[in-house]
């Protein structure tokens, strides 16, 4: 099967020729390869080879930051920026004086500014790599108090986004027909989302917004230049699908906040990308019940990693009704369903069988395990999903 064309057809709203199963396998693969517990028939294969052996589409959305390239790609992770050879851009921090300290279980970056240093630290090392995770946790955020906002703004004002279309082109060629090479921009959908996700802890962020929002907005204005430049880099690339934003929740990115600080940026990105014939994807795992109307107004094309009930309050049927033919759902199976410790075999099979029947004719729908296939997933359950999908496609 030419997975790339089939997936793009579904994402563009064309009539589906059958149900597509494109699970995210990287965290499961990394953890089990490290443990030595990969199924025997998969032990000699890389991640793309595993997808091919299983007969599923290759999920290629969020890169494995920790295992691709070298540590330099992660030096600025605590500022919300990564570098990766597959990106359509490069975040250039060469204009900022900084130093990096590598410890046993952490990586620290200290930036020099005109009014004092800004220090950050992320979890990194053997224990992190053994977990299978691909994005290091932030142990020490850049902003620890109100005085740090202008310092971080000074750093960001000296950062540059450099288009790298040739890197993305190599990535797209490497994925080939096995899947869609999604151009990664940022897990933050907007400048304000960027601040609350990456550079300030959540509770102090909201206190700052209540006490004196001026420094927060000033930093957001500086970040806006960088976010616009990332979208411009995607426009310069050959990407058909672009990822912007992730991990919404109607209690944290609550509707008024989403409406004011996130939705306008998704809409602006969608307008620019649509004008170039490209599709916008955003990562929508989380509690989304009160955000569904705003999602539609945001005008993105693909809701990646849709995680329905019983892990969240919104059923897959509700998502399908809400999104209709306007948004393609990629997801549908909560990760607890593939864990023997969380779900019985009978309940798992009933869920999968019902899903396959109720989502016909599979328009605007790509099946996956949301958010991702967990390290302890029962491999036999993955095979069951694959076989049921194959049977449905031949129905």
Image (cartoon, rainbow, N blue to C red):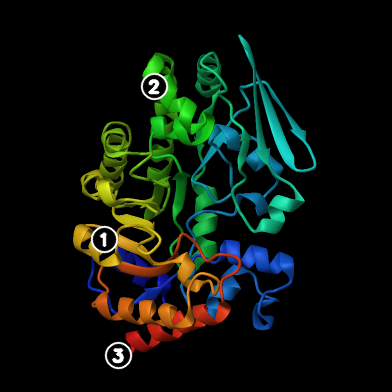
Q: Is residue 338 left or right of residue 360?
A: right
Label 3, label 2: how far apart the Cα atoms are: 55 Å
Label 1, label 3: how far apart the Cα atoms are: 25 Å
Q: Could you tell me residue 61's position as x and y percent?
A: 47, 57
Q: Secondary structure under badge 1?
A: helix
Residue sitting at 20 percent across and 58 percent down? 322
Q: Is residue 53 visible?
A: no
Q: Is residue 273 left or right of residue 128?
A: left
Of the numbered discs 1 and 3, the one sitting upstream in the chain is: 1
Q: Could you tell me residue 201's position as x and y percent?
A: 52, 31
For label 2, the residue is 209
Task: Indicate which label's residue lies in the foreground, 1 or 3.
Answer: 1
Q: Could you tell me residue 240's position as x and y percent?
A: 37, 56
Residue sitting at 22 percent across and 58 percent down? 323
Label 3 crowd bin: few (<14), some (14–19), many (20+), radius 10 Å = few
Of the numbered discs 3 and 2, the one sitting upstream in the chain is: 2
Of the numbered discs 2 and 1, the one sitting upstream in the chain is: 2
Residue sitting at 51 percent across and 16 percent down? 146
Label 2, label 1: how far apart the Cα atoms are: 32 Å
Q: How many marks?
A: 3
Q: Quadrant of the N terminus?
A: bottom left
For label 1, the residue is 319
Q: Nearer the viewer, residue 189 or 286?
A: 286
Q: Secondary structure under badge 3?
A: loop
From the viewer's perspective, is residue 194 above or below residue 88? above
From the viewer's perspective, is residue 92 above or below residue 59? above
For label 3, the residue is 395
Q: Is residue 69 left or right of residue 83?
A: right
Contact (Cβ within 8 Å) of mark 2 with mark 1: no
């Amino acid at each position: 099967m030419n997975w790339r064309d089939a997936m793009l057809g579904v994402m563009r709203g064309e009539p589906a020729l059958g149900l597509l199963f494109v699970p995210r396998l990287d965290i499961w693969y990394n953890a089990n390869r490290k443990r030595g517990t990969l199924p025997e028939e998969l032990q000699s294969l890389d991640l793309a080879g595993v997808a091919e052996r299983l007969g599923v589409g290759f999920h290629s959305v969020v890169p494995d930051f920790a295992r691709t390239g070298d540590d330099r790609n992660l030096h600025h992770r605590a500022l919300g920026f990564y570098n990766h050879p597959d990106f359509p851009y490069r975040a250039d921090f060469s204009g900022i004086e900084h130093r990096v300290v590598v410890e046993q279980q952490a990586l620290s970056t200290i930036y020099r500014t005109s009014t004092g240093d800004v220090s950050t630290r992320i979890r990194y090392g053997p224990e992190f790599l053994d977990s299978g995770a691909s994005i290091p946790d932030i142990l020490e955020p850049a902003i620890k108090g109100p005085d740090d906002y202008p310092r971080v703004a000074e750093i960001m004002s000296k950062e540059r986004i450099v288009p790298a279309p040739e890197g993305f082109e190599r990535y797209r060629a490497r994925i080939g027909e096995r899947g869609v090479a999604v151009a990664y921009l940022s897990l933050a959908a907007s400048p304000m989302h960027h601040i609350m996700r990456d550079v300030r802890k959540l509770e102090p962020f909201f206190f700052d917004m209540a006490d004196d929002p001026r420094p927060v907005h000033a930093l957001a204005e500086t970040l806006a230049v960088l976010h616009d430049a990332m979208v411009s880099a995607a426009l310069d690339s050959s990407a058909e699908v672009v990822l912007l934003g992730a991990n919404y929740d109607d209690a944290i990115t609550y509707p008024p906040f989403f409406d004011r600080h996130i939705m306008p940026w998704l809409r602006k990105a969608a307008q620019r990308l649509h004008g170039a014939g490209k599709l916008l994807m955003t990562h929508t795992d989380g509690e989304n019940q009160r955000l569904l109307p705003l999602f539609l107004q945001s005008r993105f094309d693909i809701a990646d990693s849709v995680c329905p009930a019983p892990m969240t309050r919104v059923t897959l049927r509700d998502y399908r009704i809400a999104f209709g033919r306007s948004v393609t759902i990629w997801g549908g199976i909560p990760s607890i369903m593939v864990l023997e410790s969380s779900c019985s075999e009978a309940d798992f099979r009933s869920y999968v069988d019902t899903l396959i029947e109720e989502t016909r004719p599979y328009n605007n729908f790509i099946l996956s395990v949301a958010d991702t296939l967990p390290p302890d997933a029962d491999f036999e359950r993955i095979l069951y999903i694959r076989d049921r999908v194959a049977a449905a496609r031949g129905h």
